[in-house]
Amino acid sequence: MIADGACLWNAEGCVDPVRNMIYVDYRYDVLATFMHECLHILLGESYSAGQAKEEEREVRRLECLIMRNLSPMQAKRIHVEMATLLCNDANDVDQDDD
Ligand SMILES: [Zn+2]
């Protein structure tokens, strides 16, 4: 989930469909970026390659809607889940370094 910079050139987050991963640049708003990338996965098949601007506009609209309506408890739970994923990811990296 933490990007090594390979797919985040000039982006806060991205989806790697080949590796089935979402990458989030931790220097930005992690929660909103994570929501944004999840929405790309959910809506991606609804748009053709030529509709990238329309898809981005809809993803941003829904991201704002979700972030405005997220309860404190929902935000807390998502942060906990993301932290768990980050810890698992960090453990994988540690094992790769051995
Ligand atoms: Zn986007």
Image: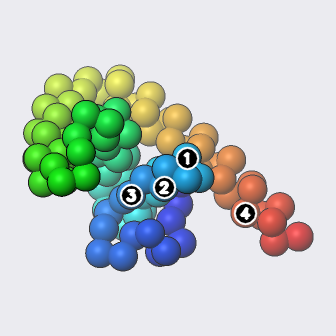
Camera-side residue of 69 and 45: 45
In the displayed structure image, the side of residue 20 where residue 8 appears, left or right: left
Please rate how many residues cluster around mark 4, counting C-alpha atoms within 10 Å: few if below 14, some from 14 to 19, many from 20.
few
Residue shown at 51%/36% (left/top)?
80
- Amino acid type shown at disc 1: Asn
Give the image location of residue 68, x and y in percent: 14, 33
Say which mark, if any, is on residue 20: 1
Give the image location of residue 70, x and y in percent: 24, 27
Labelled pair 3, 1 in contact (Cβ < 8 Å): no
Say which mark, if any, is on residue 16: 2
- Amino acid type shown at disc 2: Asp
Mark toward the viewer: 4 or 3 = 3
Please rate how many residues cluster around mark 3, counting C-alpha atoms within 10 Å: few if below 14, some from 14 to 19, many from 20.
many
Of the residues under marks 1 and 4, which one precedes in the sequence?
A: 1
Say which mark, if any, is on residue 93: 4
Say which mark, if any, is on residue 14: 3
Element at label 3: strand
In the displayed structure image, the side of residue 24 where residue 42 appears, left or right: left
Give the image location of residue 69, x and y in percent: 17, 26
